[in-house]
Amino acid sequence: MKILLINPPYITLTARFGTGHQIPLGLLMLGGPLLDAGYQVRLFDAERWRISNQAIVDKVKNFDPQIVMTGHAGSTSAHPVCVKMLSAIKRSCPDVITVYGGVYPSFHAEEILEKEHAIDIIVKGEGEAVSIDLIDTIESERPLHKVLGIAYRDRNKVIFTPPRPPISNLDAFRIGWELIESWDDYQCFGLGRAAIIQFSRGCPHNCTYCGQREFWVEWRHRNPVKVVDEIEWLHRVYNVRFFTLADENPASNKSVWSSFLEEMAARDIPVHFFASIRTTDIVRDRDILHLYKKAGIQYVLLGIESTEPEVLKEIKKGSTIQQDLEACRLLKKHGIFSIVAHVVGLKDETLRTFWTSIRQLIYYNGDFVNATYITPHSWTSFGRQVKDHPVVQSDLSMWDYRHQILAQPNLSPQKIFIAVKMLELCVQARPGKLWDILKTKDRFLRRQLLWSFFHTGLVWFGEILIWAIRSSKQILIHHEFSKKLVGELKANHSIMEKCQVLLHSYFYERNSR
Ligand code: B12
């Protein structure tokens, strides 16, 4: 049986001009167990090559698989691209069975299968164990209803099978690294070949806006020594020099986490890491932060989210502004970069709230700021809280944390956009910050700060450019509309007719918005 794994052509500014293109870890995690089960598996990274759907269809015809499997890390915003790609494949190769997985389809399986007939089966939740069971069931032509953790269409009815329990031993499934054709295609932070690796899955915390806890169900971890073995092997065999930890919360358990750090530090492998770690864990680990540095942890994304205590309480963040501040200070002391995540829209924003955030973020003095927009994923408790709140952006491809989704009562989307860009500029490119970068003594740190400053700057400019192009298109549409309206008003002479034209145009414009 031939299986083609396709990373969909979902292109983002982050991947192109920011961090760089990253390996599609989710698909590699399916590939390893499928190869071990004896299937002929190939990976096609259409994202890396920015390939058109027609070229993807040609690839599919060429390899002639029985099954095409797809899914993307940026799951919600990549969904429209996945649907278009699978529709093109299904049109040209109707016999290919299409399997779709990841976070967004897991929570929206019913509506997707009802609407998108190009998708045959959706895998809900983590994919390794299900995929083996599913492909084996398809190959031996057994009924699908025995496969736990999937949804599929049967005579136009969507069928859900019972959920599959989370994998208890994460080391039981290996990653299909050999599916990567060219390692040079994947680089991160200008530090050479890069891989993503997952030490743990899930998160024990209950932050209202995040749905990753619901997705992975419970926090589990791999054997720390085995993970370090794998990192060492990837460095030795493929010269991988940078690793992103794909964990929501790798430091959840101090003793397991320090075993990993100690093992990394003891082996002295010349690699660097990016990891998302809670500020509370950084403060808790103040006595072992030297081990973080020795293990290679270089970029830490701190989910600070808000600089206001009431907001932190409301979103159940479980941290305080004192801990957030302390975490930034401790990381700086140990020569580790902090990337401060700030979420816009957790409360009603005004120009004053933006100004307060700017002042506070400057005071925190993290190395980078990552300003994102609150995104109401339906499976999060925040999403349920605001389900009737007006949205300014219904196009899912924009639900990528870089676009405003929820309407704000006090500021228009234009004003919000400008305020966010100003926040990024004031916090990131203020003269004091630039001077700090230039006077950094350590050459490696200075080089990395400059590299990251330049690339975040490119993304910043790129986002403004795209916004300006979109806004001008809107103005042109409005201009055309107004010209037409004036013409119609001139052509209709009676007051009644003029009123009718105005009413009609009002409702037309409202509906088309
Ligand atoms: C590493 C990472 C990145 C890296 C690399 C992404 C990559 N190419 O792999 C970078 C920094 C580039 C990145 C960028 C973005 N990211 Co990101 N990223 C992550 C992170 C930390 C880990 C992702 C990961 O590798 N997980 C581990 C793998 C194994 O999980 P997985 O992909 O979900 O796959 C498993 C299952 O979902 C399932 N599965 C997945 N696909 C399929 C397909 C089939 C057929 C089957 C059967 C099963 C299946 O099986 C897999 C194994 O169990 C997560 C947060 C987190 N901790 O999960 C955010 C996360 C995935 N990112 C997110 C977002 C929004 C983005 C961006 C859109 C942000 C932006 N505006 O630029 C971009 C997308 C750009 C891009 N090209 O990827 C969101 C997605 C939210 C959502 N529901 O849509 C997450 C969840 C963060 C969050 N907490 O909300 N990201």
Image (cartoon, rainbow, N blue to C red):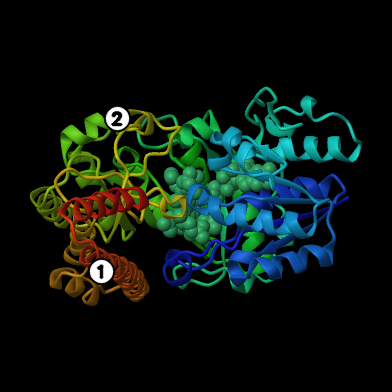
Closest to the observer: 281 or 409? 409
In the image shown, does 471 or 507 lie closer to the viewer?
A: 507
Q: Residue at x 38, y 45 (%)?
A: 277
- Name the residue at the left extreme: 352
Query: In this view of the protein, can residue 334 be seen by the observer?
Result: yes
The outermost residue toward the front is: 494
Q: Residues within 10 Å of mark 1 (few under 14, many from 20)?
A: few
The picture quadrant where one finds residue 267 is: bottom right
67 in relation to 269, above or below:
above
The residue indicated by pointer 1 is 487
Residue 295 visible in image: no
Disc 2 element: loop
Q: For the residue labelled by badge 1, is the local secondary structure a helix, a strand or a loop?
A: helix
- At a point 78% along the width and 62% down the height, the residue shown is 60
Q: Which mark is residue 316?
A: 2
Residue 148, position as x, y percentages in the image: 72, 27
Closer-to-camera residue (313/195): 313
Mark 2 crowdedness (10 Å alpha carbons): few <14, some 14-19, many ≥20 = some
Residue 279 sits in which quadrant?
Answer: top left
Question: Alpha-carbon distance for marks 2 and 1?
Answer: 55 Å
Q: Which residue is at a point 26% across and 57% down the rendered structure image?
A: 332
Dot 2 amino acid type:
Lys
Q: Position of residue 364 (x, y in %)?
A: 18, 52
The picture places residue 271, in percent across and down from the top left corner, at 51, 63
